[in-house]
Amino acid sequence: MKSDLITGLVGSGVAGWYLMAASQVKIFAGSATAGVNAQTIPKLWGTCLLILSLMLIFRAIYKYKQGEKGRSAREIIEGIRNKREVAYTFGLLILYAILMKPVGFIITSMVYVYLQIWVLAPVTARNKRMHCIAAGLAVFFSISLYFVFTKYLMVMLPAGILR
């Protein structure tokens, strides 16, 4: 119950910030087709996050009114430890967003994909072969996505230190 309330409040705050940032995305003249522009998808994702966060808040309030016993702080911390991949993924995403502009899309994406594969791989599978496969996938997908976005979709991505 308490964890749903905290998660819902944090999610609502993040969704509010995301929606404000999405409304500041530049719209290029002539790019709006049938009401769809560069702000559409970010606003849709932000709205979905806000709705899901509000659902968590309402669920916590409903459980509280029903008298359901919430989890203790120790149980919440243990739950986070058991799901540390989620926390690591959020941390990696935040670093990815922070480093994208100064370092550049290609290098940041390579590091992110490699580390994300490492985080999600089972501990028993983390060996030299897995590191080589993760590095290869990171390089291939980062460079491929860069060319697809810049050459075919005409999306400007930060070049960073590779100028």
Image (tube, grey):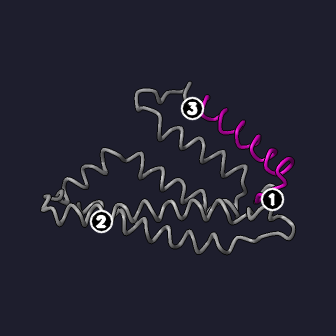
Tell which tag, 3 or 2, sits nearer the viewer: 2
Residue at 42 percent across and 49 percent down: it is: 86
Q: What residue would you read off at disc 1? A: 156
Type of the residue with mark 1: Met
Q: What residue would you read off at disc 2? A: 5
Dot 3 falls on a residue whose secondary structure is: helix
Q: How many residues crowd mark 1 within 10 Å: few (<14), some (14–19), many (20+)?
A: few
Looking at the rendered structure, which numbered label has been put on residue 91?
none
Left or right: residue 140 compared with residue 92: right
Quadrant of image for the N terminus: bottom left
Looking at the image, the residue that sits furthest to the front is 34
- Give the Cα distance between marks 3 and 1: 30 Å
Residue 68, given in percent of the width and then of the height, sits at 14, 58
Residue 83, given in percent of the width and then of the height, sits at 35, 46
Type of the residue with mark 2: Leu
Dot 2 falls on a residue whose secondary structure is: helix
Give whichever of 10, 40 is nearer the camera. Answer: 40
Give whichever of 87, 14 is nearer the camera. Answer: 14
- Give the Cα distance between marks 2 and 1: 39 Å
Quadrant of image for the C terminus: bottom right
Q: Earlier along the polypeptide chain: callout 2 or callout 1?
A: 2
Q: What residue would you read off at disc 3? A: 131
Q: Which residues are magenta?
A: 133-158
Asked which quadrant contains residue 45, the reply is bottom right
Asked which quadrant contains residue 13, the reply is bottom left
